[in-house]
Amino acid sequence: MKQATCLVDKNYKIDDIDANLYGSFIEHLGRAVYSGIYEPGHASADEQGFRKDVLACVKGLSVPIVRYPGGNFVSGYKWTDGIGPISDRPKRLDYAWRSIESNNVGIDEFVDWCKKANTQVMAAVNLGTGSPQDAGYMIEYCNHLEGTFWSDLRRKNGHKDPHNIKTWCLGNEMDGPWQTCALSAVDYGKKAREAAKIMKWVDPDIELVASGSSSPLMNTYPDWDRIVLEQTYDHVDYISMHRYYENEGNIEDFLTSFADMDDFIKTVAATADFVKAKKRSKKTMKISFDEWNVWYIKKQTEHPWAERPAILEDQYSLLDALVFGGMLCTLINNANRVKIACLAQLVNVIAPIVTKPGGGILKQTTYYPFQQVSIYGRGTALKTLTTAPTMSVARGEVPSIQTAATYDVEGNKVTVFILNCNAETIDFSIDLRSFGKTIMDEHIIMDGADLFAQNTFEQPETVIPRNSVPIESSNNLYSLNLSKLSWNVVRFSVA
Ligand code: AHR
């Protein structure tokens, strides 16, 4: 049997994990909002029309922040269409997804939904068709107390207290030719900088995310990130990253997507540090990895200007959940730089949660690794020193086992997350020698004979985690069998 070892030392600290590392995303896209989180008339709808079954499922993921309202949608969105009496709101064509937007949900309702879901809003302003001043007005509407046109309008619309939305994205994927009113890096950088100035004048307590490259596959990457930061460095707090993976035929390439994601983060961090040096700045730019996932259905099915079309409704397999776990490890391993990350998306659209209009709710395979990491992956990220066989894939020689570890000092818990990309069982030992006495609490596994198995409404528990019997050790050395192609969460108590 092949062997691998993993040393986790409490002194090898990467950084404290920002709670916002486990954020997500709801866009006005397909059925994410309408018949996703919001479905008046549904048996589980509350007085505002929000589905309580969806709220319960979202709460189960412990998501600290949710990006809204887009995504590509935001670049043609007039946020004022979504405020005031619902019956007065205009129906509009949404250019991004060729859909009809009813505007029945807008920023006020979304803030209410976030409160119900125990989460925070990460709002995006429109820097496509929108102007820097529109962005300023939106902050004034949301965060200014009272006594001005926009703040008093919010109060009139039923929200006396300011929303106090702290984190704001300066547009979305403005490097993409698909984006409504896409810009060059210099033009976007200038527009974002001027919007940022107004937004921070209106509320100095907010933090801002500049739009980085939509993907490392863009021809403009990484110059885009450099140029945008050269224009905005002193005015923003984060640079964004987006990356989606799919199975293009070679399973090992796909399983080891975590390695590509790691390279991408390191390159953006290096690019930001180059600008930092050039500007003689003392500030280190944080990263907001605010779109990441596995995504297959890129093309929209024909749906000429439909309301809530069922688009981008990917169904996820065990294989996708494994890849997903590897990506979550990469986020933890870069916790010193990545301070916000958003699983794109949360409900129905490339999402871990799927609803039937008028019907039930389903947890996809990817729900489980996200839930485990979001709940157990808190505290401090520790560097894992893992020695494992490598794998030769299209992007080069990469580790065949991906690991991450977290230490919850207050709760006295250590958690080790492991993705085994090998198509064979691995003898894997975890060495916790620095922790004093430890006890293994549980070993949770996701694996199975069929890598392409999925959860369906008919068989919702085809792919769910299982528990293996914890093993004992008198010397803090735990020798486990990692089943082939498996995702593992191993939890320990520190005495
Ligand atoms: O998450 C789906 C889409 O992917 C978003 O709207 C866009 O930002 C990205 O291209």
Image (cartoon, helix red, strand yellow):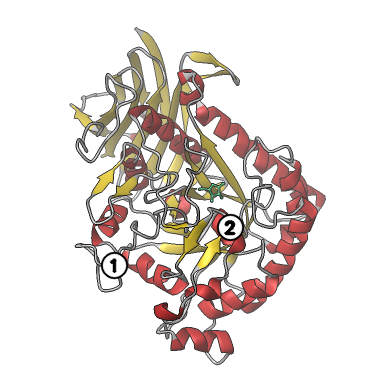
- The image quadrant where one finds the N terminus is top left
In the image, residue 341 above or below residue 134: above
Q: Which is nearer the N-term, disc 2 or disc 1? A: 1
In the image, residue 73 above or below residue 86: above
In the image, residue 18 above or below residue 152: above
Label number found at residue 65: none
Question: Which secondary structure lies at badge 2?
Answer: loop
Q: Which one is in front, 321 or 401?
A: 321
Residue receiving disc 1: 40
Residue receiving disc 2: 95
Question: Which secondary structure lies at badge 1?
Answer: loop
**Kind of residue sitting beneath label 1:** Pro
Give the mark toward the camera: 2 or 1.
2
Q: Position of residue 388 (x, y in %)?
A: 46, 17
Give the CA separation, mark 2 to mark 1: 25 Å
- The image quadrant where one finds the C terminus is top left
Q: Which one is in front, 19 or 316?
A: 316
In the image, residue 454 above or below residue 188: above
Q: Position of residue 25 (x, y in %)?
A: 45, 54
- Tell me what residue is drawn at x 32 percent, y 47 percent: 354
